[in-house]
Image (cartoon, helix red, strand yellow):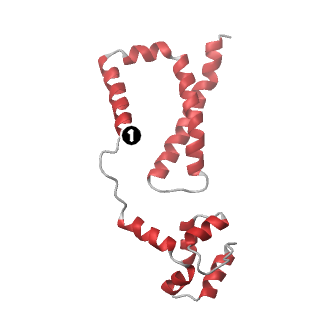
Amino acid sequence: MNARISKRSWVTPLTLGSFILCAVSGILLFFHVNLGLVKMAHQWLSWVFVFGVVLHLGLNWVPLRNAVIKPVGALIVVAFVAITAISFMPLVEQQESPVRKAMSVVMELPLQTLAQTCGKSDEELAAILASHNIKVVDQSMSIKTLARKNGQNPVEILQYLL
């Protein structure tokens, strides 16, 4: 059996399968649907897609070269290279949104202040956190500090409290 045909029997399905994973997980992440392991799968298994594409390109080098030396093919490739390069440039000054600023302020509030803001007692707040296996050492801690000390996501902690 020809080695090239043998490689195609697994390289093409590898490329197609990993493309499906990247496409579906990328679309879900675009719409902020982060269920289960979607984000981790997208970030880590995209490397399988890159590997598959490199192998696929190696196996199909002549048809690829023939496609990109034509004006339309060359224009498409150059356009995507330009878009990629431009995407790394800061075109406008990035300003933090008011919502992000507010979240940053809330994340720095002491737990006792946050409890009062939420209309809960310190004990109720501690009980809610304890039910999520989050240990409160000091009520003057902020959510940010609490999250770091407990290995948790500060946004999730805030969701528990609200």
Q: Which of 16 and 154 is in front in this view?
A: 154
Q: Which residue is drawn at 57% across and 23% down?
A: 55
Depth check: 77 or 142 in front? 142
Q: Looking at numbered disc 1 in the image, what kind of residue is underneath it?
A: Phe
Q: Residue at x 62, y 64 (%)?
A: 148
Q: Where is residue 65 in the image (x, y as percent from the top left)?
A: 43, 15
Quadrant showing the N terminus: top right
Rendering quarter of residue 143: bottom right
Q: Residue at x 63, y 22 (%)?
A: 9
Q: Position of residue 66 (x, y in %)?
A: 40, 13
Q: In this view, does 115 lie to the left or right of 94?
A: right
The image shows residue 144, relative to residue 49, as above or below, that is below
Label 1 neighbourhood size at 10 Å, few (<14), some (14-19), many (20+)? few
Q: Quadrant of residue 154?
A: bottom right
Whole-percent x and y of residue 76? Answer: 34, 26
SS for dot 1: loop
- Image position of 43 with respect to 17: above or below: below
Q: In this view, does 104 lie to the left or right of 17?
A: left
Q: Relative to 76, does residue 71 appear above or below in the rendering?
A: above
| Residue beneath disc 1 | 88
Q: Which quadrant would residue 49 be assigned to in this image? A: top right
Any part of residue 86 in sight: yes
